[in-house]
Image (cartoon, rainbow, N blue to C red):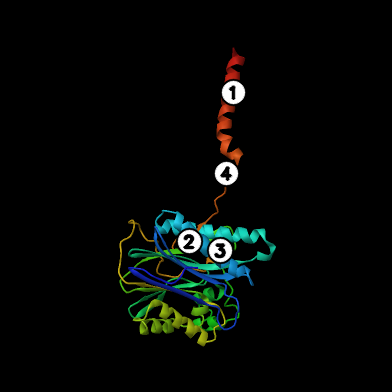
Amino acid sequence: MSAPVTTSPLEIAGLSHPGQVRSLNEDTWATASVSAGEVMIVADGMGGHRTGEVASQMATQTLVEAMSENRQVPPEGLPRALQRANLAVYQHASKRSESRGMGTTMTALVVDGNAAIVGHVGDSRAYLIRGNQIQQLTRDHSWVAERVRQGVITEDEARNHRWRNVITNALGSRPQLRLDLFGIELRENDTILLCSDGLSNMLTDDMILSMVQKNQNDPAEVVAQKLIDAANANGGPDNITVVLTRVKKLGRRSKNYPLPQLGREPAMAVADLEHDPKHTIILEPTRPVSPIRKYIVPIVIVLYVVVFILLLRFRR
């Protein structure tokens, strides 16, 4: 896990706490500088003792490695890195009976100059705080979130619902990866907050906005700590993780590319979709080509030539 860093033109800080109830922290966060820009990650592991912790750490480490190695623009490199992380967790769980069912949420942000690209799986969140407004950029992939979008229950009811922890989409749960991918144009003085549900379940959007604004002159790490303290003060039943990014000055993108669009209306829950091009992309795992398939075309060509030559000789 990376230490809190301050970079120009960004100020970034990340902190995590196990909360007031759990002794084990299954959350993982990281920041990294790669060729595509600055990467920020929050992951919330699932699967019980050890396995959830392993899932979030493995996925985060794999994503950072993949982003460090590739030279693609973020809208292309980020989903491929997420799929690599997805397969790492899935294959680990498939080979070990004690790890069956493990998985992790993951919300990853890449800031490339004046652009922010977000890849999202699960119910960790990304918020944009701009001026006097806060906007939840990601949509939760959870049972209660879908019921809220359908108008069946309210936001307040969802916070205390007995099924609030039921996730409809997780990294590592299947070889195919379904994720939300979108980008936004940044402005100076924007703040982007990534957090696990240990924070968002304890603090309302207005509470988060008020705290960020009230402490805007404090270092980012101080603000992150105050957010965690507030979640703990409200009960802290879950692990709490925050990565706070302040845009001090806009830079230039490494390359010019279109940003994937989020769309105006929230899409349905990922579990209910086969494909939603406005919000969700599906990545299939790369399968190695078998030796037989690799050489089947040359073999067929050779056989065709041999048969043709034999036919010519037979006619003579």
Compute the Cα span from label 3 to label 2: 10 Å
* Residue at the spot of label 1: 306
Give the secondary structure at mark 4: loop
User: In the rendered image, which residue does mark 2 sit on?
Assistant: 64
Three-letter residue code for mark 1:
Val
Amino acid type at mark 2 = Val
**Residue 64 point in image, percent of width and height:** 48, 61
Q: Check whether the beta carbons of the residues at disc 1 and disc 2 lie within 8 A of each other.
A: no
Rendering coords of residue 272 (x, y %): 55, 66
- Of 170 and 265, nearer the camera is 170
Q: Which comes before the other along the chain, label 3 or label 4?
A: 3
* Residue indicated by mark 4: 289
Residue 285's tag is none
Q: Closer to the camera: disc 1 or disc 4?
A: 4
> Going 57% across and 35% down the picture, which residue do you hit?
295
Residue 261 lies, in percent from the top left, at 39, 63
- Residue at 33 percent across and 63 percent down: it is 113
